[in-house]
Image (cartoon, rainbow, N blue to C red):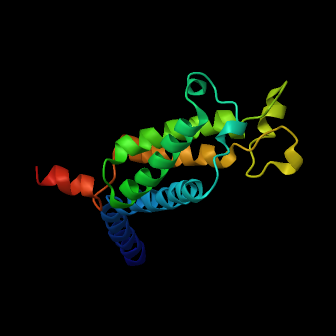
Amino acid sequence: MPAIKSAVNFYDVVIAKLNTINSWLPQLALRLILAWEFGEAGFEKLHGTNWFADLTFPFPFNLLPPDISWNISLTFEIAGAFALALGLATRFFSISLIILTIVAISAVHWPEHFNSLSELLKGYRIIDEENDGFGNYKLPLIYIVMFLPLLFGGAGRASLDYLIKRFR
């Protein structure tokens, strides 16, 4: 019986430590990986050529000229990356980058055509193999899911959002 009691006590100590870390580490990890991914995309746009003119954006995003859409995307990806890394205005940038990602899915990653659920699910992949028209929306969908804890739970304790709220 003492061995079982020791194991239970050890388990309780580990769970207490994990609960303490839970207030900052998962959010920090999500913020940093999303900041890296969106910052990388933004800096590629900053140093690249505007390929948005070749896309068909869904309504109402098709009302903007491609140059404006390019600059909005570039700005939110770069500013959002820095803000996420710092944990500043995390909920604002989370919803902004979710919207940007939904537009990207609908304009770039969504299947060109599908007649059934099984054809739609063929696009749930990372790469668009041989441009077969089934899309590649897996990675952007993963990003959206990764943003949800930040949107609903905030940036966590290791953030400027937390410090600002604490010292207000």
* Quadrant hosting residue 3: bottom left
Left or right, residue 85 beside residue 49: left
Residue closest to the eye, 5 or 100: 100
Q: Which is more toward the observer, 5 or 35? A: 35
Q: Residue at x 10, y 49 (%)?
A: 168
- Residue 139, above or below 15: above
Q: Nearer the viewer, residue 60 or 16?
A: 60
- Looking at the image, which residue is at 54% across and 56% down? 46
Residue at screen point 49% across, 41% down: 72
Residue 151 placed where, x, y %? 40, 42
Q: Give how far across and how far down residue 134 sits, in percent.
A: 82, 38
Q: Nearer the viewer, residue 153 or 107?
A: 107
User: Which percent across, then down, holds residue 155?
Assistant: 34, 52
| Most distant residue in the left direction | 168
The answer to which image quadrant residue 117 occupies is top right
Q: Considering only vertical position in the picture, is 132 above or below 4?
A: above
Residue 26: x and y in percent read 42, 59
- The mark tally for this picture is 0
- Is residue 168 placed above or below 116 in the rendered structure? below
Residue 133 lies in quadrant: top right
The reply, left or right, for residue 142 in relation to residue 78 is right
The quarter in which the N terminus is drawn is bottom left
In screen coordinates, is 95 left or right of 129?
left
